[in-house]
Image (tube, rainbow, N blue to C red):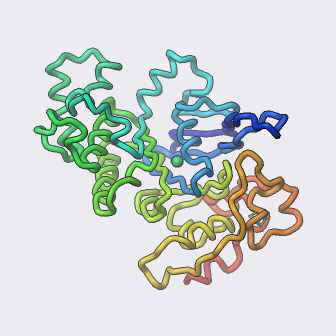
Amino acid sequence: PPVLVRVKNAKKYFKLKKGIFTKNQQYVKAVDKVSFEIFKGETFGLVGESGSGKSTLGRVVIGLHEADEGEIYFEENEITALNKREFQKVRKEMQIIFQDPSGSLNPRMKVQELISEPFDVYTKMTKKEKEEKVSILLEKVGLGVEKKLSYPHELSGGQRQRVCIARAIALNPKFILADEAVSALDVSVQAQVINLLKDLQKELGLTYLFIAHGLNVVRYISDRVGVMYLGQLVEVAETEELFDHPLHPYSAALLSTNPVADPKKRKDKIVLQGEIPSPANPPAGCRFHTRCPIAQEICKTKVPDLVEVQEGRQVACHFPLLTNSKEETE
Ligand code: SF4
Ligand code: MG
C-alpha cells in the first residue's frame, strides 16, 4: 500500500534539570531511534504505558516537536528538511486532536469563530464563505447549526470534541494525529466520537495516527498497531494479529491486561515484575530485559532491532513468541 508518512530513525531527547548530585547533563530519551510507516487511508494505533513516548512520537511526526535526529517524510516531502515557511504549507495537511477539548478551545470564542480560525490563518475567505463552511462542518461532525453561537462551556465534552474535529478537518487535511482524543469522554460518548472519526475517514480519505492508552478503543479503530516501550517501538502488526497473538513479550504482557468480552479469546494476565525503568536511564541491551519473563544473557547486552519476522509483522526481540503462536488459538 502507498505510504503517507515515513519515519526513519527519529530521535527526541529532552534535557532534565540538573540535580545537586548529577554532574552530567541527563536526558529523557522520549523517542529513541524509531522507524515506521503509516499507509495512506489507514489508522495506525500507538499503545504503550504512559511515559513510553507515544505522544512525543506523535508530535515529532507532525513537526510539533523538532526531531533531534532522523527523517520524517510526508508524501514526497522530507519535512525534517523543510524551512519554516515550506513546512507551514505541509503542516496544513496534518492536523491534531488533543485529549482535553476545553484546554484547546479558547473559552471566549464562539463555535463559529473557533471553527473558522483555521480559515483566517490559511485562507482569504469572506465572512459569508466562512459562515457557510462552518455550517457544513458542523453538520459533518453531527452538531446542529444553532451551536454556532455557543461558547465551549455551554457544550458537553463530546460536543466540544466534535468542535475540535470540525476545526481539524476544516482545511481538508490528509492526516490527523489523535492523541488520547476520546480518553476523557464517557464510554458511550467515546464510541460515538470514534464512529464519527471512522465515518469521516471514509468520507474524506483521511489517515490517522491514533494514540490512546485504552486498548479496546485502539483495537476497534486501528488497522495496524505499534507497541512502544521506553521510547522505542517493540512491535508493529495488523491489529487482530497483534491482539490475538502478540510476538513481543512486552506486547503479550500489556495486552494481557486488556479486558476481553469473548471468553475464548481471554488470556491469563501476565504480571510484569519490577517498575518501568526511567527513560532517562534505560537498561542496556534490550530495554525490556529487566522485566521480561523470558530474558536470556544476550538480552542484557545486545540491542534487538525491529525486524520483520512474518509478513507485515515487525518485532524487536531476540526470542519472539513465534512457536505455537498460531496453533494455540485455533
Ligand atoms: Fe525479552 Fe530478550 Fe526479547 Fe528483550 S530481547 S523482549 S529481554 S526475550
Ligand atoms: Mg501521552
Image x and y of residue 283, in percent: 80, 54
> Residue at (51%, 22%) from the top-left corner?
87
* Residue situated furthest front in the rendering: 20
Give the answer, above or below, for where 80 lies relative to 279.
Answer: above
Image x and y of residue 228, in percent: 62, 54
Front position in the image: 187 or 86: 187
Image x and y of residue 57, in percent: 58, 42
> Residue at (28%, 33%) from the top-left corner?
107
> Residue at (70%, 32%) from the top-left corner?
69
Front position in the image: 196 or 199: 196
Tell me: 123 left or right of 241.
left
Rendered image quadrant of residue 5: top right
Give the answer, above or below, for where 49 lies relative to 116.
Answer: below
Image x and y of residue 298, in percent: 88, 63
Tell me: 170 left or right of 306.
left
> Residue at (53%, 17%) from the top-left corner?
84
